[in-house]
Amino acid sequence: MGKKTWREKLYSSGDLPKVERLEGKAAAKWGEVLMAIPAPLEVYEIMSGVSYGKLLTASEIRQIIAAKHNADIGCPLTTGIFTGISANAAEEIAAAEGKDPIPYWRTLRAKGELNEKFPGGIQAQILKLEAEGHTIIRKGSRFFVKDFADQLDTSRMQ
């Protein structure tokens, strides 16, 4: 059996989503809270709904996931992994179906940072974001959307 495609990874949810109470080392870091661990498709669906000119960060996605599952927080690790899977699956699906991908490039890392793991890397994300009117700034070797917090899509957040 060969390596899974991005689309297969997107639809492979195993026992996810699930909600767990944190214990041990995790509780020491985050507190004894309920953490929602999303399914990859949940992250994809959230990313697909970001309006033109708006942005999301993984933090907002985690807040949406937590609210959806009546949890205190959304899992930072799986949410980060699933944003990458979603972006790559979006390109794979778009190519197979001959249509535009979901606007994954509107999803940023913490503090408005661009994601080098998205299809085409930083340069592709810069082109897509600038085409939508966003200004990209460089800080050392990293790239950010200027004033990203003013452009966040907060319509689905509670």
Image (cartoon, rainbow, N blue to C red):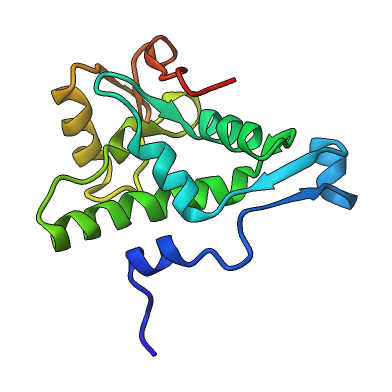
Identify the image quadrant of the N terminus: bottom left
Quarter of the view holding residue 131: top left
20 relative to 59, above or below: below
Name above or below for residue 142 compared with residue 77. Answer: above
Q: Is residue 18 left or right of residue 20?
A: left
Task: Measuring from the top left, give residue 9's x and y in whole percent.
Answer: 42, 66
Left or right relative to 17: residue 142: left
Residue appearing at x 54%, y 46% in the figure: 79
Q: How many numbered badges does the structure rendering display?
A: 0
Give me the residue at 40% from left, 32% from top: 108
Quadrant containing the C terminus in the rendered view: top right
Q: Specify the farthest residue to the bottom.
A: 1
Q: Which of 141 and 20 is in front in this view?
A: 20
Q: Which residue is drawn at 48% across and 23% down?
A: 156
In the rendered image, the residue lying farthest to the left is: 98
**Along the line of sight, the residue nearer the viewer: 99 or 79:** 99
> Residue 54 occupies which quadrant of the picture?
top left
Residue 70 point in image, percent of width and height = 71, 35
Q: Is residue 141 visible?
A: no
Residue 59 visible here: yes
Residue 115: x and y in percent read 37, 40
* Residue at figure coordinates x 70%, y 35% from the top left: 73
Q: Position of residue 116 (x, y in %)?
A: 34, 44
- Viewer-nearest residue: 27 or 141: 27
Q: Quadrant of the rendered structure where residue 145 is?
A: top left
Task: Tell me: 63 left or right of 124.
Answer: right
